[in-house]
């Protein structure tokens, strides 16, 4: 349980908080959120990276797809794999490149190919990388492995008949919960608080709670003010319109 809590805490990006966040953004909108789809080489690709210029193509780095493609073709050139290919549309596969493309992919008993169409090399190569997303906002940056989680916005009841709107998951998108609470308080003209999310898997994560049912408005602020794509904001009005923030 302790290890899971530590891993969960490590997954929360380090970003400006409180006064630092306010100083970074001023009174205007925060810096725009910038996404970059990146690729991290799998361990099975180490042999190919070892055969190319490691200064320009280090193994332990993140790559845009175009740069990742350059690595395999640099290896093909350095190893002379076009020389004995059956046609100009093919490249030979030496043991290193063959393992990089097919080790763990082919089923037991399948025969490893000795050459491959050039048009098939790139997709097979790219498929061996781990997709990651690099997010940046101003001077802050965060790399997320795998798919990006969604921000969750939903209405709820608190303390009997009191209506509130809860927002969880903003940290991944480099939004300080305290700064978000301050922004929502102004834009919604309502009281907002920040509290820690319960559970071992949520160590270090917070939720912003706004008074009143303001699901639609909060979702719009996240997309328009904080530039989070709408597809990554999940909104749910559990109160079905009751207690709407005017």
Image (spheres, grey):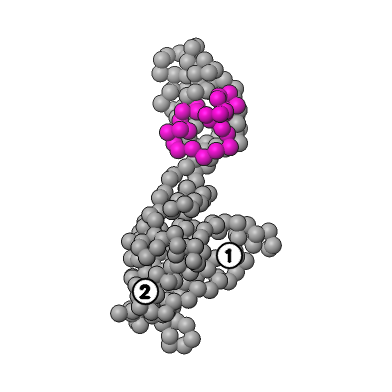
Q: Tell me the SS state at disc 1.
A: loop
Which segment did they paint magenta? 48-72
Q: Position of residue 83 (x, y in %)?
A: 49, 12
Name the quarter where the N terminus is drawn.
bottom right
Q: Is residue 36 on the magenta stretch?
A: no
- Quarter of the rendering containing residue 8: bottom right
Of residue 20 and residue 47, the one placed in the foreground of this image is: 20
Residue 204 marker:
1
Residue 60, position as x, y percentages in the image: 58, 37
Quarter placement of the C terminus: bottom left
Task: Tell me the crowding category of disc 2: few under 14, some 14 to 19, or many 20 or more residues within 10 angstroms, Cα based.
Answer: few
Q: Nearer the viewer, residue 106 or 15?
A: 15
What residue is rendered at 52% in x and 58% in y?
15
Residue 67 within the segment the image draws in magenta: yes
Q: Quadrant of residue 231?
A: bottom left
Q: Give the numbered dot on residue 186.
A: 2
Left or right of 95 on screen, residue 215: left
Q: Residue at x 48, y 69 (%)?
A: 178
Separation of marks 2 and 1 at Cα, in angstroms = 25 Å
* Residue drawn at 55 percent across, 57 percent down: 14
Most extreme residue toward the bottom is 160
For the residues labelled 2 and 1, say whether their Cβ atoms are less than 8 Å apart: no
Q: Vertically, is 75 above or below 22?
A: above
């Amino acid at each position: 349980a302790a290890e899971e809590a530590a891993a969960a805490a490590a997954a929360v990006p380090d970003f400006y908080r409180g006064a630092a966040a306010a100083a970074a953004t001023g009174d205007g909108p925060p810096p725009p959120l910038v996404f970059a789809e990146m690729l991290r080489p799998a361990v099975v690709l180490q042999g190919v990276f070892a055969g190319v210029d490691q200064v320009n193509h280090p193994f332990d780095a993140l790559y845009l797809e175009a740069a990742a493609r350059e690595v395999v073709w640099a290896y093909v050139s350095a190893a002379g794999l076009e020389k004995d290919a059956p046609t100009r549309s093919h490249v030979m596969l030496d043991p290193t490149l063959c393992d990089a493309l097919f080790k763990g992919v082919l089923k037991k008993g399948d025969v490893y190919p000795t050459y491959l169409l050039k048009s098939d090399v790139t997709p097979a190569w790219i498929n061996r990388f781990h997709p990651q997303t690099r997010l940046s906002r101003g001077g802050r940056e965060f790399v997320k492995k795998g798919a990006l989680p969604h921000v969750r916005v939903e209405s709820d009841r608190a303390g009997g008949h009191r209506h509130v709107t809860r927002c969880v998951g903003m940290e991944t998108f480099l939004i300080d919960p305290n700064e978000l609470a301050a922004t929502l308080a102004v834009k919604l003209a309502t009281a907002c608080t920040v509290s820690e999310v319960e559970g071992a898997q949520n160590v270090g994560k917070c939720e912003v709670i706004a008074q009143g049912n303001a699901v639609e408005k909060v979702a719009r602020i996240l997309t328009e003010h904080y530039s989070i794509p709408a597809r990554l904001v999940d909104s749910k009005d559990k109160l079905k319109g009751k207690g709407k923030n005017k």
